[in-house]
Image (tube, grey):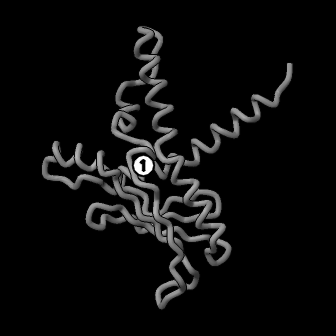
Amino acid sequence: MSTQEEPLEIIIDYYKFKNFCLDGNSVIFNVECTYKDADDSNRAEIELMMKDMGKWDCLVYSGDFLLSNLKNIQSIPKNALEKYHTKFGADLYKPAVVTIVEKGKTTDKSLLKVKIELTDGEYQKREGVRIARPVLRVDEIMKQVENIPKWIVFQKTLSNIREVTP
């Protein structure tokens, strides 16, 4: 039996998201711009991307909810959508803090460091029901970051459909 490991890097366009880890009540990770040193325009782009966290997950969850309530129409196996039945969405987190980390001994390019924290209200809710696990988990953030490209493609598809005239 093989187990599927979490990806060590997530690639979105020309960015590598890597080194996801828990830091107290935050998840932090690095973003490497693959073709140049990171600058303020890259920092702003990553901040914008982080606002799309959870939007794909919400779309899939809503679609599953709609189909499951239409009875006998749903053909998607229930277990295929389990990963979307958890809390998700940028509104659960404080705005991502994205900083530029200059070149160091271990890197040949400057990187972006991203810090994600729960809002105070969400933290309190989770702290009240926590059972032997961190309030915020690395895999929760990784799954949502992995789905950002799906949301971007979905938005582009909708935009292209709107442009089509009969």
Expressed as whole percent of the image width and height from the top left, the position of residue 1 reads 28, 48
Q: Amino acid at mark 1?
A: Lys
Expressed as whole percent of the image width and height from the top left, the position of residue 40 reads 63, 71
Asked if residue 122 lies left or right of residue 95, the reply is left
Between 124 and 141, the one lying in front of the other is 124
> Where is 139 relative to 22, above or below?
above
Asked if residue 10 lies left or right of residue 65, the reply is right
**Residue at 39% of width from left, 36% of height from top?**
84
Q: Residue furthest front?
A: 120
**Residue at 41% of width from left, 8% of height from top?**
71
Q: Residue furthest left?
A: 132
Expressed as whole percent of the image width and height from the top left, the position of residue 116 reads 40, 59
Q: Quadrant of residue 108?
A: bottom right
Q: Quadrant of residue 27?
A: bottom left
> Where is 101 relative to 72, above or below?
below
Expressed as whole percent of the image width and height from the top left, the position of residue 87 reads 35, 39
Q: Residue furthest right?
A: 166
Image quarter hosting the C terminus:
top right
> Where is 130 relative to 16, above or below?
above
**Residue at 33% of width from left, 62% of height from top?**
26
Between 18 and 7, the one lying in front of the other is 18
Asked if residue 158 lies left or right of residue 53, the reply is right
How many numbered callouts? 1
**Residue at 58% of width from left, 48% of height from top?**
149
Question: Element under label 1?
Answer: helix
Judge the density around disc 1: few (<14), some (14-19), many (≥20) Cα neighbours within 10 Å: some
Per the image, the residue denoted by label 1 is 143
